[in-house]
Image: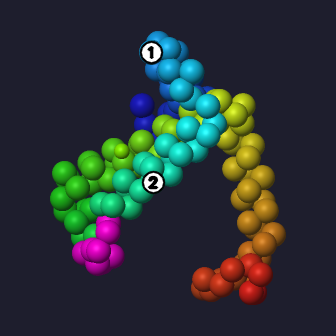
């Protein structure tokens, strides 16, 4: 599998099979899955805690073990996101397209280019 050859639906089907093979549907309610996304995001953040951002970028490119750990935590976050989308019956592509359109309207290039200001402050 790789990003160019894999669809969101294929990943949704894989995580659904993984869940159902283990009879875990009973645990995969949207509350638990939202919490799991947050917990795994915390584990991803923990890898970066108290470290300098420039040093982290160097480590990410030079330390394959570190990059593997980062990838594993990112995968944990994303897999729970796909499980959440399955349990909540959400079409990931559709909601992302809607959100990108909304963000495009909130952050027009002419007002937001090179600015980190929130849309309410543009
Ligand atoms: Mg994890």
The residue beneath circle 1 is 22
- Direction from residue 74 to residue 105 in the image, left or right: right
Q: Is residue 120 above or below residue 94?
A: below
Cα–Cα gap, marks 2 and 1: 24 Å
Q: Which residues are magenta?
A: 48-55
Q: Nearer the viewer, residue 117 or 32?
A: 32
**Colour convention:** rainbow
Main SS of the magenta part reads: loop
Residue 32 seen in the current view? yes
Q: Kindly identify the residue that appears in the image at 63 percent across and 36 percent down.
A: 30
- Direction from residue 106 to residue 30 in the image, left or right: left
The residue beneath circle 2 is 41
Image quarter where the C terminus lies is: bottom right
Q: Which picture quadrant has residue 10?
A: top right
Labelled disc at residue 108: none
Q: Which picture quadrant has residue 113?
A: bottom right
Q: Earlier in the sequence, mark 2 or mark 1?
A: 1
**Is the CB atom of the residue marked by disc 1 within 8 angstroms of ligand 1's nearest atom?**
no
Q: Position of residue 25 (x, y in %)?
A: 56, 21
* 70 magenta-colored: no
Q: Position of residue 94 (x, y in %)?
A: 75, 43
Image quarter where the N terminus lies is: top left
| SS category of the residue bearing label 2 | helix
CA neighbours of label 1 inside 10 A, class few (<14), some (14 to 19), many (20+): few
Q: Position of residue 22 (x, y in %)?
A: 45, 15
Ligand 1 is located in which of the four quadrants? top left
CA neighbours of label 2 inside 10 A, class few (<14), some (14 to 19), many (20+): some
């Amino acid at each position: 599998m790789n990003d160019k050859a894999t669809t969101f639906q294929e990943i949704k089907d894989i995580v659904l099979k993984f869940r159902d093979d283990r009879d875990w549907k009973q645990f995969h309610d949207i509350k638990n899955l939202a919490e799991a996304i947050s917990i795994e995001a915390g584990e991803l953040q923990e890898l970066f805690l108290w470290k300098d951002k420039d040093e982290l970028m160097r480590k990410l490119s030079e330390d394959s073990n570190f990059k593997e750990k980062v990838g594993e935590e990112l995968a944990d976050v994303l897999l729970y996101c796909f499980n959440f989308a399955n349990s909540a019956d959400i079409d990931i592509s559709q909601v992302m397209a809607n959100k990108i359109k909304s963000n495009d309207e909130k952050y027009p290039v002419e007002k937001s280019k090179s600015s980190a200001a929130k849309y309410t402050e543009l």
